[in-house]
C-alpha cells in the first residue's frame, strides 16, 4: 500500500502506544529506523523516523508517499491501526499470507545472516525491570 509519511508516523505511534502492556501491536520494520521515548505520553512517543535510501538514512518526509508492505490484519485496522484502514493511497491484497511469503523468501535465500540491526531504539525504558519486549540470542547463520 502507499502511505504518506504522516500515516507511517501515526502507525508507528499506534505500535508503541501500549508498550508497557506488551500489546501485540508493536511493529517490526525494515527499510526504516526509529526511536521512541517512553517518558512521553502515548501518541507523541516517536521522536525520530529515518527512511533508508540509496544515499543512506534520511528523515521521514511527512508529506511524501512511501510504498509499504503490511499484513492484511493491520491493513484492515486490526490492533488499532485505523490509520492504515483509512489510508486512501494505492492498495492491493496479494492473496498471499505473510507466513507463506516469508517462507518462500527464506527458501530463495538458502542462508540467512541473522543479526540485531538497531532499527528500533527505546528511550527511557524503566531501569531494573525486565524489558517489555526482549531479544534472545540471535544465531549467526540459519539454513533453510
Image (cartoon, rainbow, N blue to C red):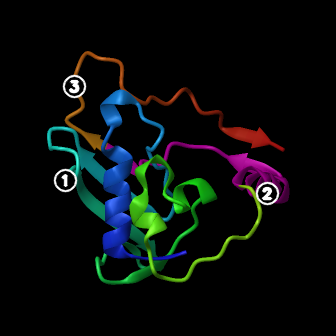
Q: Earlier in the sequence, mark 2 or mark 3?
A: 2
Compared with 23, 105 (above or below) is below
When asked about the image quadrant of residue 123, the answer is top left
Check if residue 45 falls in the magenta segment. Answer: no
Whether residue 59 appears in this view of the structure is no
Mark 1 nearby-residue class (10 Å; few <14, some 14–19, many ≥20):
some
Query: Residue 86's quadrant in the figure?
Result: bottom left
Task: State the residue at coordinates (79%, 57%).
Answer: 109
Task: Name the residue carrying label 1.
Answer: 44
For the C terminus, the image quarter is: top right
Q: Which residue is mark 2?
A: 109
Q: Is residue 53 above or below residue 134?
A: below
**Which quarter of the figure is the N terminus placed in?**
bottom right
Label 2, label 3: how far apart the Cα atoms are:
39 Å
Is tag 2's residue or tag 1's residue first in the polypeptide sequence? 1
126 relative to 31 in the view: left or right = left
Please give the label number shown on residue 126: 3
Is 17 in front, or is 137? 17
Marks 2 and 3 close (CB-CB < 8 Å): no
User: Where is residue 132 drawn, in percent x and y?
Assistant: 37, 27
**Segment tinted magenta in the rendering:** 98-121
Amino acid at each position: 500500500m502507499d502511505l504518506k509519511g504522516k500515516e507511517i508516523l501515526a502507525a508507528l505511534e499506534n505500535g508503541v502506544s501500549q508498550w508497557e502492556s506488551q500489546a501485540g501491536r508493536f511493529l517490526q520494520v525494515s527499510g526504516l529506523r526509529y526511536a521512541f521515548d517512553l517518558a512521553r505520553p502515548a501518541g507523541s512517543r516517536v521522536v525520530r523516523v529515518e527512511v533508508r535510501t540509496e544515499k543512506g538514512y534520511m528523515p521521514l518526509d511527512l508529506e511524501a508517499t512511501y510504498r509499504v508492505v503490511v499484513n492484511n490484519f493491520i491493513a484492515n485496522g486490526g490492533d488499532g491501526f485505523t490509520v492504515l484502514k483509512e489510508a486512501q493511497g494505492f492498495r492491493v491484497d496479494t492473496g498471499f499470507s505473510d507466513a507463506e511469503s516469508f517462507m518462500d523468501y527464506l527458501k530463495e535465500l538458502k542462508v540467512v545472516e541473522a543479526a540485531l540491526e538497531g532499527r528500533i531504539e527505546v528511550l527511557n525504558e524503566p531501569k531494573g525491570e525486565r524489558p517489555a519486549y526482549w531479544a534472545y540470542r540471535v544465531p549467526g547463520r540459519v539454513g533453510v
